[in-house]
Amino acid sequence: MSCVSDSSSLNKALRQQYLSLPQGPFCQVTYIWIDGSGEGLRNKTRTMESEPKSVADLPEWTFDGSSTGQSEGHNSDMLLIPVRMFRDPFLLDPNKLVLCEVLKHTREPAESNHRNKCNKVMEKVKGLQPWFGMEQEYTLLGVDGHPYGWPRLGFPKPQGLYYCSVGADRAFGRDIVDCHYKACLYAGIKITGTNAEVMPSQWEYQVGPCEGIEVADHLWMSRFVLHRVCEDFGVVATLDPKPMVGDWNGAGCHINVSTASMREEEGIEHIEKAIEKLSRRHEEHIRVYDPHGGEDNKRRLTGRHETSSIHDFSAGVANRGASIRIPRQVGQEKCGYFEDRRPAANCDPYAVTCEMAVTCMLDDVHE
């Protein structure tokens, strides 16, 4: 069975001949949205007569929600509401990628639209200047579902060789990683780094710090760009939190959090206060840290492979086996941020950042 898709073998030089044709004053705008699974991304493209300068220039659009798990066939039209615009690294300037919210015909948010609630919460806490950074782990697979670069029979050498590795026998798929990084920079996505992860064929990139809703917008668009780059290479990026059973690391989406008071002198007091609040709402957070109410994270948060147990809450300085890690530098300088290591790789960043703001910040708005 082939490990790469048939479409990836099409003549890319011939494709470039057509992509390089002038397009006059017109602009191709690709609308992107989250489907009914809460994990999948869909997209379609329209022509505009001129280049839009901001989201305000973009019209609402509709799509068939019965084909995306978001409506019934007898009343299938769903609304696409543009919320953030990026440059298109695949069709190039002046073309655009546009992230959209999904609304029902009543203009109520679709069930998979967690951005609507998140944005309202972020507006309430914006005076605290909340900053978020997210660390997206993912695993590269062939289209046959086998980890990219792994032996066709058996397993690669055990973990230990692959984290931040270099070499053809250790780093699998770096071309994809480099292309994704450059595409994100071109698009205007706030990607801040990347590295090979502990399991072979597993990688990570970081988005942020961003203030408020922005980090989730940028993370969702970075995921679209990742899947689109992988499509060109004929492989698959999975966000499954435990893609391989056995003695292999899972995949998370750790979130780094701070407010202005945490970043100031003696901000450690505010960090510790937030961690204490988190300790009281562990189960509520676990329920929103993957799209299936904690079922995906059960496979990952075992207390092994640099994770805490899903059943227990813990915190510690420089402890990657804890629910919450306080970076060593933060512990020394007594200010900065904390890291929640519980969110799964396939989490909805709107749901995660919203829950974090509700737990740690809403009370402080009125104090």
Image: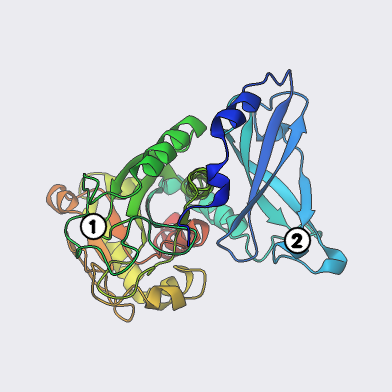
Determine the residue positioned at 48% across, 47% down. 230
Residue 281 visible in the picture: no
Q: Residue furthest bottom?
A: 311
Q: Is residue 220 above or below residue 28?
A: below
What residue does disc 1 label?
Answer: 269
Instruction: Answer with left or right where residue 118 lies relative to residue 153.
Output: right
The picture places residue 1, in percent across and down from the top left corner, at: 48, 62
Label 2's element? helix
Relative to the observer, which residue lies in front, 32 or 89?
Answer: 89
Q: Position of residue 284 (x, y in %)?
A: 44, 75
Q: Depth check: 313 or 187 in front?
A: 187
Q: Secondary structure at mark 1?
A: helix
84 is higher (above) or lower (below) than 227: above
Q: Amino acid at mark 2?
A: Gly
Q: Position of residue 210 (x, y in %)?
A: 42, 43
Q: Is residue 61 left or right of residue 365?
A: right
Q: Quadrant of the C terminus?
A: bottom left
Q: Nearer the viewer, residue 39 or 353?
A: 39
- The one nearer the camera, 40 or 85, is 40
Three-letter amino acid code of the residue under disc 1 = Glu
Instruction: Say left or right for 344 vs 109.
Output: left
Which colouring convention does the figure follow? rainbow
Which residue has dot 2 on it? Answer: 65
